[in-house]
Amino acid sequence: MILCYANLLCIDRDPLFIATSMTADEARALLLRSQDVAVIDDPRWAHAALLGTGFREGDGPHAQGIYRCIFLRAGLTLAVAPVAGLGFAHEGGTMGDEVRQLRREKTDERQLVEAVAEFCKELHALPVTAETDSFGEWQEPFATSYRRRIGYALGFHASLRAGSRTCFEAHDGLLVAGTAAKLDILTHGHDEFESFSLRLNLLARLRRLLSHERHRGAPWPGLAKVQSQQDKLALLNGRLADVTDQLTPRMNADGRFAVRALHRQLDAERDAWQVDISRVWGEGKEFSEPAELPA
């Protein structure tokens, strides 16, 4: 599998802050300032590029491959979220010896990005950080990865906050046999961000259960047939629409893009045979479409 290896200077802010307070254009301008203010005796920095990488390898010694990391850790850490920044990227490597060789070859590049980040933070108080030794699945435009990162953070906010995906995944009993009123209790988080995340994931799970029933003619293994299907779909669709209306006025243009793209990603898989694939919010092609998405 060909991967993208990158060493990037990135915005050091929570994605939800970015979604409300810093557009991709503003982030781009801030990062480009580093090329003006960083007094670095290395001509390569003048040729650093704005770019993004797709879903990336998680941090730590136990990371053993893009897909393993995504499906085991998605929603638990931002370490597998897309990354957008200013720096250098290279295609190549299939994990293993080729990756270790690539890391050895790019040691100077990694140290350069780290030096720029330190200089910009210490002397100019720029909110930047070095994201080094980052392996993504692909390389793409800066703004696309910037929005994917927002989408990932919005979609998984509840599980990132809790440190567990049980808030999405431990409620099959209610989704199948509970009443709509009892299911409604699960949809209310501490704030609009958490409520959006809970409702998005519960609705996705319910649709998967129903998709399995349609395609296989039988309930999900180990579960009974979903009761009061239309009532539950109406509840979750309505709750998601309500919290979307509450969030949208707080968002900047890229935050609104990410919210719309998450809805489109959910709708694109409504009737698809996706029941055996762990959803990764922000992964869909909807995030690479033009900025002029219909509202």
Image (cartoon, helix red, strand yellow):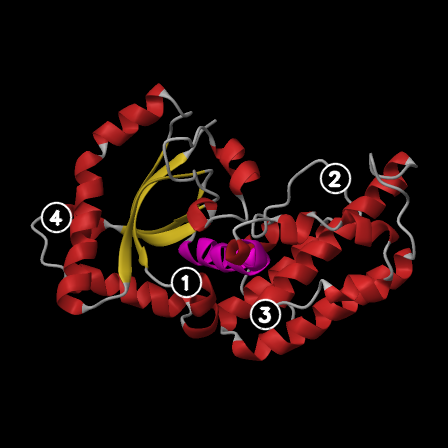
Could you say where residue 263 lies in the image, as x and y percent from the top left? 67, 60
Q: Which residue is mark 3?
A: 190
- Label 3, label 4: how far apart the Cα atoms are: 48 Å
Which SS type dominates the magenta stretch? helix
Residue 153 percent across, percent down from the top left: 51, 58
The image quadrant of residue 256 is: bottom right
**Mark nearer the N terminus (3 vs 2):** 3
Residue 71, picture quadrant:
top right
Nearer to me, 147 or 289: 147
Under circle 3, the secondary element is: loop
- Which residues, given as a range, are shown in magenta? 142-159
Where in the figure is residue 65, as x and y percent of width and height? 46, 30
In screen coordinates, is 231 left or right of 198?
Answer: right
Cα distance between the residues tagged 2 and 4: 50 Å
Residue 208, numbered circle? none
| Amino acid type of the residue that numbered disc 4 sits on in the rendered structure | Pro
Disc ID at residue 14: 1
The residue shown at (29%, 28%) is 102
Residue 266, magenta (yes or no): no
